Amino acid sequence: MNDRQNAKLNMAQRVSDTCKRYKDEYKGLPAVVSAVAALNKDIENIRELLKERAEVNVSAATLAKRTAEKNMIVPCVKMANALYIIGFIHKNQELITLYGSSEYSFYSLTNNATLALAKRVLNLSKKYAEQLEEYGINSEKINETEKAITEFQSLIAKPMDKIGERKQKTTNLVQLFAKLDATFYDYLDRAIILFKHSSPNFYGEYRTARNIIFQNEGKSKKK
């Protein structure tokens, strides 16, 4: 929540507290009672959404992710280099393209690109599993690498889901503040005029809570 939204929520709470103190003044006016109820519901909805959004944890790269990434990259680099040698010996262009594979070349990519490269190496390793055994890379190591890739994929997918969820809640928050504005401008700010003379204390405290300057009122007095 930005500073403006925070200030607006605090203002709304001050108005709500004021209305609560003067509830006997408007209890016989259904329209005002409904407007105050709408205000309290708006505040409740905003606070609830803020709580939900705060619980959406979008953390930076965690230790678990870095560990999974290393567990994936280290064996993939060994596989890629072994596959390149096999490709060079047998003039296999599919494998020769793995030339220059290193941990740096993996780490320098984005998460999704690193994952794609690791999957490519894994698929080629399965395809040329028999030849890789000569380089100490057996089916067990290939399976372990596949598990590491799956683990890394699950860890980078979760933050993206969280980011999407947090963005949606931020959009919803904007909509709730728009609803709060409508409650004030369309109902409460108009209704409070009814109490200017009948309940000047309520009227004055409402104005103070809202921090509204009625410029038009001043102009009318001059006239």
Image: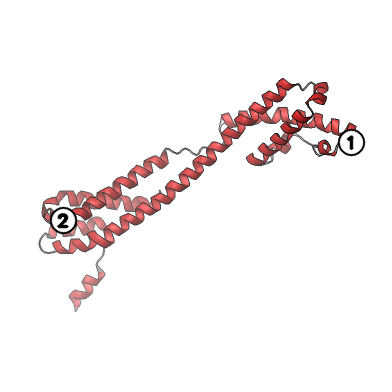
State the count of labels.
2
For badge 1, the amino acid type reads: Lys
- Quarter residue 128 falls in: top right
Find residue 46 and report its horizontal and vertical position in percent. Answer: 34, 47
Who comes first in sequence, dot 1 or dot 2?
2
From the viewer's perspective, tell me whether residue 105 is left or right of residue 163: right
Residue at screen point 77% across, 35% down? 101
Residue with the most extreme bottom position = 223
- Residue pointed to by mark 2: 30
Label 2 neighbour load within 10 Å: few <14, some 14-19, many 20+: few
Q: Image height check: is 152 above or below 165?
A: above
From the viewer's perspective, tell me whether residue 201 is left or right of residue 101: left
What secondary structure is marked by label 1?
loop
Residue contact between numbered discs 1 and 2, judged by CB atoms under 8 Å: no
- Quarter residue 81 falls in: top right
- Residue pointed to by mark 1: 91
Quarter containing the C terminus: bottom left
Find residue 127 and report its horizontal and vertical position in percent. Answer: 77, 30
Q: Image height check: is 114 above or below 146?
A: below
Find residue 203 and report its horizontal and vertical position in percent. Answer: 17, 59
From the viewer's perspective, tell me whether residue 58 is left or right of residue 103: left
What secondary structure is marked by label 2?
helix
Residue at screen point 21% across, 71% down? 217
Residue at screen point 68% across, 26% down? 145
